[in-house]
Amino acid sequence: MAESESTADKYFASLEARDWDALHALLAEDVVYEMPQTRERVVGREPYVRFNREYPGDWHLRTQRVVTEGRHAAALVDFWIGNDHEPACVWLDFDETGRIIRITDFWPVPYVPPTGREHLVERY
């Protein structure tokens, strides 16, 4: 359980620091990222890192709480772009090697995804 918590903490820290190499190292090759509110999915380590690297705006995040059990973690996260704030719940699943295999972001309300990331996401 300590390994899952440590990996979750490193995941959020690497995103906030824009440390793409550190993020890359935490992810399984076939990681799946989903956002149910926009019905978007990104499949694969390289596309997911690029998705975050190209995400528009001066965004920041801070974890409020991380809870882990076995190969699963849930986090309450504060997300900002400029002065706009949104809370989110993020679920992480880990494979047998401890790498992140699935990421699901839950945002408070559905929204239309921004344009310009169609090359990285599929809609479901």
Image (spheres, rainbow, N blue to C red):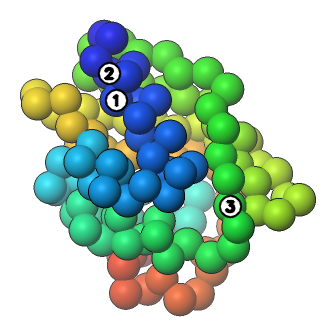
Marks 2/1 in contact by CB < 8 Å: the verdict is yes
Marks 3/1 in contact by CB < 8 Å: the verdict is no
Q: Where residue 52 sits: x, y (%)?
A: 47, 65
Q: Amino acid at mark 1?
A: Thr
Image position of 47 with respect to 119: above or below: above
**Residue appearing at x 69%, y 73% in the figure:** 57
The residue labelled by disc 2 is 4
Dot 3, crowdedness within 10 Å: few (<14), some or many (≥20)?
some
77, 21: nearer the viewer: 21
Task: State left or right for residue 107 relative to residue 39.
Answer: right
54, 107: nearer the viewer: 54
**Residue appearing at x 30%, y 34% in the figure:** 93
The residue labelled by disc 1 is 7
The residue labelled by disc 3 is 59
Which quarter of the figure is the C terminus placed in? bottom left
Image position of 11 with respect to 29: above or below: above
Q: Where residue 48 sits: x, y (%)?
A: 34, 64
Task: State left or right for residue 6 relative to residue 65.
Answer: left
**Residue appearing at x 67%, y 26% in the figure:** 64
Q: Where residue 92 sits: x, y (%)?
A: 38, 35
Q: Secondary structure at mark 1?
A: helix
Q: Secondary structure at mark 3?
A: strand
